[in-house]
């Protein structure tokens, strides 16, 4: 027994099922069930929510989510060696855990989930940013999820919550904060994982806003931000030259000095620039 439930401790689960960590699958497991329960709590109230978990591995976070009362957990795991251990958890929580064996980048989970839906995951680092960008850029807003509570390398977490003027401020901060509240809720040292990764990690909690903070067409905002930060040391009048005709006039019209660099410009100002460009294109 392990404290949060009647299942065996995770070290025993890993030994019983022969789940030696594989680097190629980004396997750094959390073995402390008190910690996984804490991460589960960071996702907010779970009782009336379905939870999508990517990469449950031997199931530490899965057990945290279920012990904290998640209505239903849908877990997508690529490594078939983990399935027997996850099957034992499903048996301990009848009807509340569904496991899909597959690649999270290829599986569409929506058929198996009922809103409200929260996403919680200790993500494999190699696909974490790609999944986050997908979740932040759905065809329509609000998205299918109400919150994302995700483990990242600390450097990526800092890019998500960065403010204008920070070294880490860029495309990811704007994507995340334009339509979400984003904050770091937990910092973890390498020793919290088995095996310990080379870098520290942080859990980021993002809550989807009902509407974007400032109006803008996502495609136009995306083009401006991509061009501005592709050449982040250049002045905007140069880095945005290819984005729209008369770019200097648009920058001035919305109060951005054309000599400014992207890393100093707020999300509000980028949105105003997008509207100015779209207004000129429409008119
Ligand atoms: N959630 C577990 C924990 O906290 O101990 C494991 C986290 S480990 C960092 C990442 C997990 O994602 C591993 O179990 C790995 O097998 C799985 N994984 C890796 N690539 C995946 C993919 N493309 N789709 C689904 N799962 C994947």
Image: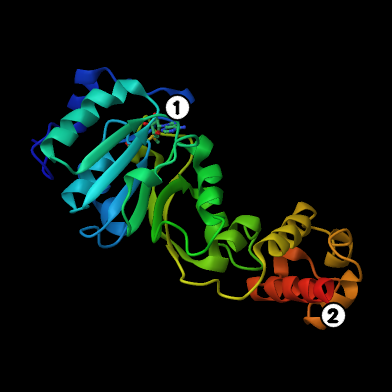
* Image quadrant assignment for residue 41: bottom left
Who's the residue at 24% across and 58% down the image? 46
State the quadrant of the N terminus: top left
Left or right: residue 280 compared with residue 79: right
**Disc marking residue 25:** 1
Can residue 18 be seen at all in this image of the molecule? yes
Q: Position of residue 35 (x, y in %)?
A: 26, 47
The residue nearer to you, when weighing 5 against 33, is 5
Q: Position of residue 111 (x, y in %)?
A: 37, 44
Q: Which comes sooner in the sequence, label 2 or label 1? A: 1
**Disc marking residue 252:** 2
Where is ligand 1, by quadrant?
top left
Q: How is the image coloured?
A: rainbow
- Element carrying mark 1: helix
Tell me, yes or no, whether the two marked residues, 2 and 1, touch with CB atoms within 8 Å. Answer: no
* Disc 1: residue Cβ within 8 A of ligand 1's nearest atom: yes
**Disc marking residue 154:** none
The residue nearer to you, when weighing 141 against 14, is 141
- Crowd around label 1: few <14 · some 14–19 · many ≥20 (10 Å): some
- Element carrying mark 2: helix
Q: Position of residue 223 (x, y in %)?
A: 74, 58
When the figure is inspected, residue 258 is found, relative to residue 76, above or below; the finding is below
When the figure is inspected, residue 4 is found, relative to residue 27, above or below; the finding is below
* Image quadrant assignment for residue 104: top left
Q: Position of residue 171 (x, y in %)?
A: 65, 57
Left or right: residue 278 compared with residue 8: right
* Image quadrant assignment for residue 258: bottom right
Who's the residue at 59% across and 60% down the image? 175
State the quadrant of the C terminus: bottom right
């Amino acid at each position: 027994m392990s404290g949060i439930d009647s299942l065996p401790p995770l070290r025993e689960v890993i030994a019983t099922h022969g789940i030696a960590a594989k680097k190629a699958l980004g396997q750094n497991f959390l073995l402390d069930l008190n910690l996984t329960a804490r991460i589960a709590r960071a996702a907010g109230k779970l009782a009336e929510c379905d939870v999508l978990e990517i990469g449950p591995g031997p199931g530490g976070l899965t057990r945290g989510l279920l012990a904290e009362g998640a209505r239903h957990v849908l877990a997508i795991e690529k490594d078939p060696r983990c399935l027997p251990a996850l099957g034992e958890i499903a048996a301990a929580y009848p009807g509340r855990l569904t496991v899909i064996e597959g690649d999270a980048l290829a599986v569409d989970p929506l058929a198996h989930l009922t809103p409200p839906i929260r996403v919680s995951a200790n993500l494999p680092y190699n696909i974490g940013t790609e999944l986050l960008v997908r979740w932040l850029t759905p065809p329509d807003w609000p998205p299918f999820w109400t919150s994302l509570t995700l483990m990242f390398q600390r450097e990526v977490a800092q890019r998500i919550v960065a403010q204008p003027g920070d070294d880490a401020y860029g495309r990811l901060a704007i994507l995340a904060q334009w339509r979400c509240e984003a904050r770091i809720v937990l910092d973890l040292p390498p020793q919290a994982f088995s095996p310990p990764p080379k870098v520290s990690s942080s859990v980021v909690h993002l809550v989807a806003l009902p509407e974007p903070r400032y109006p803008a067409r996502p495609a136009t905002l995306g083009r401006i931000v991509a061009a501005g930060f592709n050449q982040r040391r250049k002045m905007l009048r140069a880095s945005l030259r290819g984005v729209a005709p008369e770019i200097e006039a648009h920058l001035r019209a919305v109060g951005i000095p054309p000599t400014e660099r992207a890393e100093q410009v707020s999300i509000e100002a980028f949105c105003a620039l997008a509207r100015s460009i779209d207004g000129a294109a429409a008119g």
